[in-house]
Amino acid sequence: MPSRSTPKLKRIQMKINNKTDSGKAILAFIIKFRKAEGRPPTFREVQNHMGFSSPNAVTYQVKVLRSIGLLKTGPKLETP
């Protein structure tokens, strides 16, 4: 059965259509990781998944995703 796109998902897809492939891949990874782990990935986890040599690449892409409203900053959690 084909999946249906919700109006919210369509708006998100329209916003990222002009963004880089890295930004799209990072957003997809964050969504998948959060569903699997119950928390968002760390910048280092995103960096390792994407194969970036520097966390600055993640910082830049996350800034872009935040600026267009696709990511929100939540409260920081203490590491146990």
Image: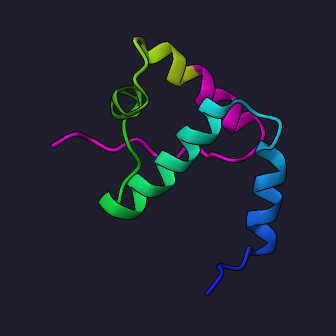
Where does residue 17 sit, x and y in percent of width and height?
Answer: 80, 43
Q: Is residue 5 left or right of residue 78?
A: right
* Rendering colour mode: rainbow
Position of residue 5 relative to residue 1, above or below, is above
Residue drawn at (34%, 27%) of the image: 48
Q: Is residue 57 left or right of residue 79?
A: right
Magenta region, main secondary structure: loop
Residue drawn at (83%, 36%) of the image: 18
Position of residue 41 relative to residue 37, above or below, is above
Location of the C terminus (image quadrant): top left
Residue 32's image quarter?
bottom left
Q: Say whether residue 79 is magenta.
A: yes
Q: Magenta region: which residues?
A: 60-80
Residue drawn at (36%, 36%) of the image: 42
Where does residue 33 sit, x and y in percent of width and height?
Answer: 39, 53
Q: Say whether residue 56 is magenta.
A: no
